[in-house]
Image: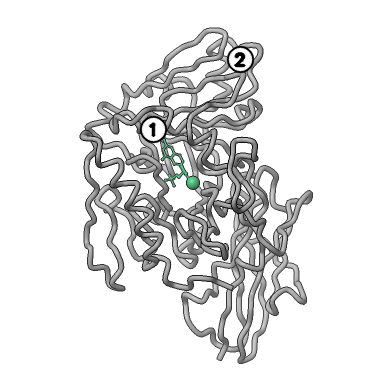
Amino acid sequence: MKKSKNTPNLNRRNFLAGTASVAGLAATASVVPITFANANHTDGSKGLPDFINWKNRDALIVHSDKGIETHRSAIGEGLITPNANVYIRNNMPTMSDAQIGDRNNWKVSFEGVNNPKSFTLAELKAMGTTTIATVLQCSGNGRGFFEHGPSGSQWQTGAAACVFWTGIPVKTLVDACGGISSGANFMTSAGVDHEPTGLAPKDAMVERSVPKKVYEDALLAWDMNGVPLPNSHGGPLRMITPGYFGINNVKHLGKVAFTADESQVKFMKSSYRISPIGKKGSEYPTCWEMPVKSWITRPTDETGTVKAGKVQIVGVAFGGTRKVKSVKVSVDGGNKWQKAKFIGPDLGKFAWRQFVLETTLSAGTYNIASLASNGKDKQPELRMENRRGYAHNGWKDHSVNITVA
Ligand SMILES: Nc1nc2c(c(=O)[nH]1)N[C@H]1C(S)=C(S)[C@@H](COP(=O)(O)O)O[C@H]1N2
Ligand SMILES: [Mo]
């Protein structure tokens, strides 16, 4: 069911689209040009960009220097995605150590509260710490399955990860600031990664508004899976909006404001709008809540022929803003469905869960699909067609074709 099986990193149209906007950025003097390390990867494709040369190249598909996804099979058998395998999506270049400076002196300001304040990272760390697991997923995850060729990275399943974040609840900070000002409807978070580019904030600032209520679950995170948040994932501090698409999880966080209106920057107003093909505009819904979704991680068409006999079919499933309730698996393209069991620990409603169906397969070819429900909604069969290929949770496109011999 894949449109571009095993070839996304060779997709020339996408490669050019990716580099074109970086070239645009490079025109401004202060941007450090991005270089690629180990350019001759074993499969002939691009190596890792230098700013993430610590990542596990074999686990990743490099679409561009701004879009790197995890192979379907590299999600692995652990529930948590190892940092070295976690996808990267940059609208703005990752900030360098020099641009960040002393991490403990990093500042985040709180506005739209009764007593506006600014906190350093050192102060935040002294105010309280908690850890939550969430699914971080790009709005465009699954874009590679759309037939109309939406622009952007041709993600398959791997612009997603399940991560432990450690930091301070936004609620604690709201309390420390005397509560939210009256008239606020949104929590608006702003990154500062546009500053070194010198581009106009309106066009380049990653500022995102989410409904105010999100603050009750949100976290300002400084650790990712137990280590200081890497620069590439928004270090030293990022916003975590559980259940909401990746773009709302603002990296290099400089400001949190409770606002009456949505931000007017490009990344809020015009980008990330879910509009019909051929249409665009700020009147269309933005990428906020993630819908329920699942996909198979083993066996996959990346791992070759499967031996006939007893086979485990394994995958991940998450419910978006609600807890995932159940998963069904089909080995015949969705004609018959069998209930899968959840395996491993339950890390809370914003994490994904692993599921397994143990079955017997004789020689032949199979189309394997998974269908998750969160008790309120279940995955649709087909994708919701939209211009930029956002929010794909249709089960059919996410199925895998395997050969059993
Ligand atoms: N400041 C800032 N925040 C950002 C971005 C960015 O470019 N700059 N990219 C967003 C997008 S589109 C996604 S999907 C996630 C990706 O997070 P990751 O690179 O840590 O996987 O961060 C979001 N937050
Ligand atoms: Mo994204």
Q: Amino acid at mark 1?
A: His
Spatial distance from mark 2 to mark 1, Cα to Cα? 23 Å
Considering the numbered disc 2 on the image, is that residue within a helix, a strand or a loop?
A: loop
- Give the percent coordinates (x, y) of residue 208: 52, 32
Q: Is mark 1 within 8 Å of ligand 1?
A: yes
* In this picture, residue 117 sits left or right of residue 113: left
- Give the percent coordinates (x, y) of residue 236: 36, 33
> Is 135 drawn above or below residue 281 in the view shown?
below
Considering the numbered disc 1 on the image, is that residue within a helix, a strand or a loop?
A: loop
Residue with the mark numbered 1:
252
Residue at 44% from the left image edge and 59% from the top image edge = 70
> In this view of the protein, which residue sits in the foreground, 280 or 97?
280
* In this picture, residue 316 sits left or right of residue 107: right
Residue 180 image label: 2
Residue at 53% from the left image edge and 55% from the top image edge = 141
> In this view of the protein, which residue sits in the foreground, 67 or 214?
67
Residue 264 image label: none
Q: Residue 114 is drawn in which quadrant?
A: top right
Picture quarter with the C terminus: bottom right
> In this view of the protein, which residue sits in the foreground, 250 or 1?
1
> Is 197 drawn above or below residue 158 in the view shown?
above
Q: Amino acid at mark 2?
A: Ile
* In this picture, residue 10 sits left or right of residue 392: left
Picture quarter with the N terminus: bottom right
